Image (cartoon, helix red, strand yellow):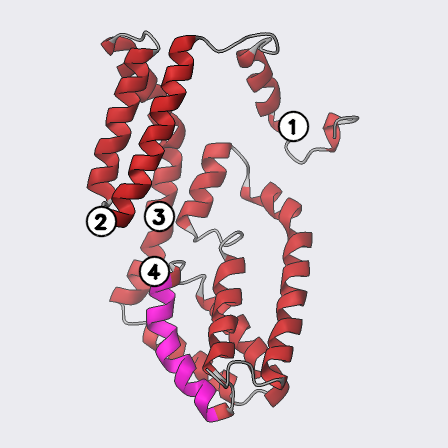
Amino acid sequence: MKKDAGASLVSSDGIDQEFVQSSGDIENEKASKSQLLAVVVLLSGVLLMIYGLIEWGWYFRELGGLYLTVGLLIGLITGLGPSKIAETFNKGFQSILLGALVVGIARSISVILENGQILDTVVQGTSQLVSVMPGAFTAVFMMVVQGGFNFLVPSGSGQAVITMPIMSGLADLVGITRQTAVLAFQFGDGFANIFYPTSGYFMATLAIAKVGWDKWMKFVWPLLIIWYVLAIVFLVIAQMTNWGAGL
């Protein structure tokens, strides 16, 4: 793509050219003392965030306050006045607003299915399919089921609460170790998070980066095929070796 920019999947978007025009020639620029101090404040805020999450149990309210405080400090350090800080915040907020809306829309699918009492029926039906699969591929089909169910419930923890009580019991009945069932869940849930349009945070990331979902899929599908082939191999090996039986 360095030799031919047209080879890029996003070459026709004009975003790269827009970035080049807005950034200008920065190769010879050096950071000022105030900018270096702003970087120190930002890194300190990140460390405080990590400590607060681990030791003080911080969540959205506390993190929001921290982000706001760090943003104000950095603005003042770099010489921005109150009005300019507010304008800059507003401009930054506009760039992620679409992503926030996408998160809400994607979440609405699982809310409707859960409140409509549809999820339990789906889980029961898929578990019946798993129970009649050939022995060597039962774990592989578990991964397929978990991957399909991830479309309805993108949250990994939420999916685990709904499906694993059934899948773990089913694993005991068909002679698969629970460790292998958990591995199938991890493969099924994890890989699907980077291509399902119902995954709110994933779609929000694409929206912020201004990358279309169709172009992302053209880019990532070869990697997904490699991952799933390896996952099938590992699951068959785990099932044949009775992995985790000694735990």
Say whether residue 154 is visible: yes
**Residue 160, magenta (yes or no):** yes
Give left or right: position of 204 versus 60. right
- Point out which mark residue 105 bears: 3
Mark number for residue 12? 1
Residue at left offset 37%, top offset 18% = 38
Q: Dot 1: what SS?
A: helix
Q: Residue at x 38, y 29 (%)?
A: 43
> Which residue is at 57% across, 24% downward?
15
Instruction: Read off the magenta span.
Output: 157-173
* Mark 3 vs 4, N-terminal side: 3
The three-letter code of the residue at mark 3 reads Ile
Direction from residue 202 to residue 11 in the image, left or right: right
- For marks 1 and 2, the one nearer the N-term is 1
Asked if labels 2 and 1 touch by Cβ distance under 8 angstroms, the answer is: no
Disc 1 from disc 2: Cα separation: 45 Å
The Cα atoms of the two marked residues, 3 and 4, are separated by 10 Å
Residue 110, numbered circle: 4
Quick one: 76 or 215, which is closer to the camera?
76
In the rendered image of this protein, does residue 136 appear above or below residue 108?
below
Q: Is residue 153 visible?
A: no
Which callout, 2 or 4, points at the residue further toward the start of the chain?
Answer: 2
Q: Amino acid at mark 4?
A: Ser
Residue 180 image point, x, y percent: 52, 78
Check disc 3 and report its element: helix, strand or loop: helix
**Disc count in the image?**
4
| Contact check, label 3 and label 1, Cβ < 8 Å | no
